[in-house]
Image: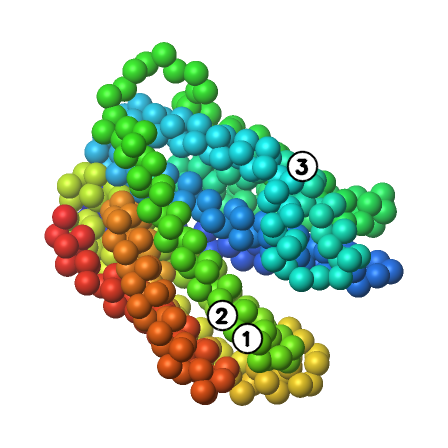
Amino acid sequence: MSYSLTDTSSITHRKIWQLAGPMILANISIPILGMVDTAVVGHLDSPAYVGAIAIGTLIFSFLFWGFGFLRMATTGLTAQAVGRAERNSIETQFILRKTLKLSLVISVVLVLCQIPLSHLAFSVIESSEGVATLGQQYFTIRIWSSPAILATYVILGWLIGHSDTRAALWLILVVNISNIVLDLLFVTIFNLAVEGVAIASVIAEYLGLALAYFLIKRRGFTLINKITFDSPFKWRTLLNLHGNIFIRTLCLIFCFAFFTAQGAKQGDVTLAANAVLLHFITFMAFFLDGFANATEAITGKAIGAGNQALLKKGFHYAAIWSVAIALLFSFTYSLFGSNIIQLLTTIPEVIHSAEDYLIWLVIAPLIGVWSYLFDGLFIGAMRSVEMRNTMLLSAFVCYLPAWFILQPYGNDGLWIALLIFLAARGISQAYYLPRILST
């Protein structure tokens, strides 16, 4: 079901939750899948299986996260097209076909380049010979899911652009639930170990793609269309849009990878403590991303329809709920942070180390909420150049210099630098806020 967003009266607090709620539920299912992947091999006879899944999952998380622009750009383009002509699906189908073609080209390149990609990934990540061997087995199988994953990214973006977040929820849940069931089948019954986890992921992704095609076909989409459409979104425009978001995403990946690498230099205990605490940020992000998705859909439709009042009201309501959720996370972390840490690890020294830096996680939601909210606004408004520039500024003018200055303060300095990065993103994006809201 999609939600009509054609006038200001259609935007209410309930409507914001109708858009954001399904995406929040979908996002929460993602870490549950990761836990099951680890658990099914965690009961086998060697810790190397757990290490291989951890490394393999890390590689594909970074690889596919980098191509998240396929989802984001499609959402903004589709939402604006819907806003321009809500009952005319020709333009939105044109956008979907174009971006699906791009996702197919990228996925074919990934599959063809799998050997050098594997060598590069496992040369960067240090591990034992046994873990590396098992991890490469996982990689060799999982890489074949690339066409399904990237195409599903595009279709998810298209559905969100139509404000059909319930369909997006069902799509993500089908992929993750089928993956869990197949994990248990292949690993615990067929004893396929790491290969079983990889095969389960590949099958689940193609099941998701089949459902995705059904969902878009239900909206009248066909793979072959003889109707020509003179869209303003030519290949060059689309590639520039995707390219800017790709650069922005690579910078974001770099910043968190840099954070992990610098923590590792301070010892295994600090590395483990930081890894535990990053789960606090990740879980917060799952919630705030739901409101960012709602903002994408509302902003795109409002700009496409030329409805400035709708744009301002939608952003205002999304901001209220985003800040409220951020306050709730800060309050929860301040009261129950130690308990959460003890749920994530039982190693005493890691617990004590993580508790020493917990104060930064209490502050993080209040600082980071703005960058998540503004990301939704920028994507819906298709301000990809500004997204790229603000990320470059935050990463290389604010984050890295701050870390260099704060190095004498150890891990506290590292966390402060990360918070400065989050604050810089919000502040630099806020600079463009009046222009976007007056569009």
Of pointers 2 and 3, the one earlier in the residue sequence: 3
Q: Which residue is mark 1?
A: 263
Instruction: Please name the residue shown 42% across and 41% down the image.
Output: 70
Quick one: label 1, few (<14), some, or many (20+) residues within 10 Å? many
Q: Which residue is mark 3?
A: 203
- Image coordinates of residue 278 in percent, x first then y, are 53, 70
Q: Which residue is mark 2?
A: 259
User: Mark 1 near mark 2, Cβ–Cβ under 8 Å?
Assistant: yes
Q: Nearer the viewer, residue 90 or 248?
A: 248
At mark 3, the secondary structure is helix
Of pointers 3 and 1, the one earlier in the residue sequence: 3
Between marks 3 and 1, how big is the CA–CA gap? 36 Å
Instruction: Please name the residue shown 19% across and 58% down the image.
Output: 432
Between marks 1 and 2, how big is the CA–CA gap? 6 Å
Q: 178 left or right of 366? A: right
Q: 88 left or right of 198? A: left
Residue 266 picture quarter: bottom right
